[in-house]
Amino acid sequence: MKTIKLSPNWTLQGSKIALAILVALSVTLLGASILMLLLPVLLFITLLNFLELRFLHCYKAGICYSRGLGKRYINAEDIVTVEFNPMAFITVFKITLANGKTHQFMNWQIDEQQQIDIAKLYKSKAGCAIKPNLQCKA
């Protein structure tokens, strides 16, 4: 069975850490009380994002991913559309299910070949056109 294993987007994670350090330094240098409230929130969000970086695997049967300490699964028959939306150094991988729910994966690095391979995995469910960086109706 073919598996597409996506790796974390370390550029995004490094940017989050750099932003947290920048906020911490500005608090130290400027002594601003508003930034003192912002820093713990920013660090908490960064920590939550790191917890979601365990794995994201795309199989013919569906998508298996981690959220925090748990493992979740999306059945391939439930997938209606697959979209890849690039923004700066982030590619948002978005799945729309038959029941109308959507799942977005932003913390993952997805190159063009992986986008094509993922679209091919789910196109046979309802015949989607393979268009990298756009939408694939599965």
Image (tube, rainbow, N blue to C red):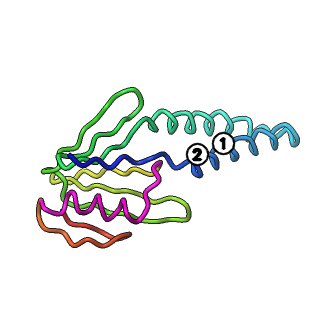
Q: Quadrant of the N terminus?
A: top left
Query: Residue at left 17%, top 45%?
Result: 75
The x and y percentages for residue 36 are 74, 35
Q: How many marks?
A: 2
- For badge 1, the amino acid type reads Ile
Query: Residue at left 40%, top 48%?
Result: 6
The rendered magenta stretch, by its main secondary structure, is classed as helix
Label 1, on which residue? 17
Left or right, 119 with reference to 40? left
Query: Residue at left 50%, top 65%?
Result: 87
Rendered image quadrant of residue 79: bottom left
Asked whether the beta carbons under mark 1 and mark 2 sit within 8 Å of each other, the answer is: yes
Q: Is residue 120 magenta?
A: yes
Label 2, on which residue? 13
The x and y percentages for residue 74 are 22, 43
- Image: 56 above or below 100: above
The x and y percentages for residue 62 are 21, 46
The x and y percentages for residue 51 are 48, 32
Stretch of the chain drawn in magenta = 107-124
